Image (cartoon, rainbow, N blue to C red):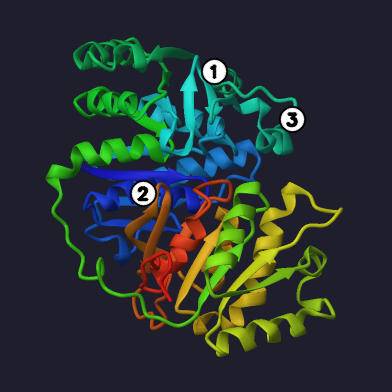
Amino acid sequence: MKVLIIADDLSGAADCAIGFASERHRTVVTLEATRTSAHEGADTIAVDTDTRRLVPEDAAARTVAAYAEMSARGQRLYKKIDSTLRGNWAAEVAALQPLAGMAIVAPAFPATGRTVRGGSVYVHGQPLEETSTWKLEHAGLAADLATQLKSAGLKPELLDAEALRDDPHALAARIEALAASGLQALIVDTQTEAALRALARATLQSEAAFFWVGSGGLAREIAALDSRRHTYVSEQRDAAFPGGPVLILVGSLSGVSERQCAMLRERGRVEELIVPPAMLREGASHRDWRAWQARIDVSLTARVDLLVRIGRDDAFDPAEGAQLSTALAALVEPHFTKAGGLIATGGETARAMLAAARIGNLQLLAEVEAGVAVGRPLDAGRTHCPGVVTKAGAFGTDRALYAAWLTLRNETEPHVGAP
């Protein structure tokens, strides 16, 4: 099976696609919805449309354009959405529905604490609308899936996969019947990996016109069930990363990222720089810009692993994330080729750095932990090929950054008590 994944940010594209790479699909993540030689022979292509911060109409138009350019005969569509419903996901799904059939909506990712019950998303058992992340960016807006889909012009129905997970034939028959009836969107309650697996099995056997809408949770179940058909082995899969200093860029200000940085500082041999957002807002014209670049140069030239974070001040606005990330990438870019590995937390941060470094495609290789992907640049003629790890900001265990750092250093965790 060949799969096209369309995501609205880079870390999301990677954390969705990595499930297929882990099951021996040849998997490529691309920053541009344009077919190139880098995509030849790929079983799974994940496109980052970079639409999370656009207005809904523009996001929908760019998503449809990506589908028109990248889709191929015999290929299944997976619309990757954020498991906490950030971005323009409903508008993008509504734009794809007339082209791709019924939308099967299941953003649950139980391995990371995201579940769907009664058509609503829960994060570690807490209703999404009560979480700090939702309140920060979407205060006062409805968080349930049906309301958002209706606002985008679709008529949804709700199906409880939990109730049918032990009867795969009944689940498949129900989905087939709903698709045949002309239903536009099917919201599927999924609280466990078993329920996602049942949904994956039922849809993989279906000949109905549909596309999947979900996060990395459903994607990995689909990939696992399809794995027996794929035997791709990459020479690069088990090859060591090139060495040299590891550059860690953190654009996310979530509490999750704070804890991950704390563990990395505690256990890793890293230097930390916290960049003032006021300087990033002003960019290269700021009086301290060159001094900060010189500090970065000194560390990387000395082969010191470097954690660079965006600070926070009273003027901070979540909407300026892309601007700050772009400025951070510009600050680092002159010295980027001295890094043997890159870890980027936050989709905007990852995309900004790869774009500044002219890395348009990544071949995904493995997973550091659930949803944390590692890969290598896949662009013809490129000489600087660092290992690259991407991770969504409010995502992963407390050891995610530390585990990614160990991976890019070709190391395993030291034994407790070791000298």
Q: CA distance from mark 3 to mark 1?
A: 18 Å
Residues marked 2 and 1 touching at CB (< 8 Å): no
Callout 2 amino acid: Ala
Q: CA distance from mark 2 to mark 1?
A: 26 Å
Horizontal side, residue 273 vs residue 353: left or right? right
User: Dividing the picture into quarters, in which one does residue 299 lie?
Assistant: bottom right
Residue pointed to by mark 1 = 146
Question: What residue appears at the point 74 percent right and 53 percent down from the top-left corner?
Answer: 320
Question: What residue appears at the point 36 percent right and 55 percent down from the top-left corner?
Answer: 367
**Disc 1 on helix, strand or loop?**
helix
User: Dividing the picture into quarters, in which one does residue 163 lie?
Assistant: top left
x, y percent for residue 51: 57, 46
Residue pointed to by mark 3 = 139
User: Dividing the picture into quarters, in which one does residue 309 lie?
Assistant: bottom right
Residue pointed to by mark 2 = 17
Question: What residue appears at the point 56 percent right and 90 percent down from the top-left corner?
Answer: 302
Callout 3 amino acid: Ala
Mark 3 vs mark 1: give the one in front.
Answer: 3
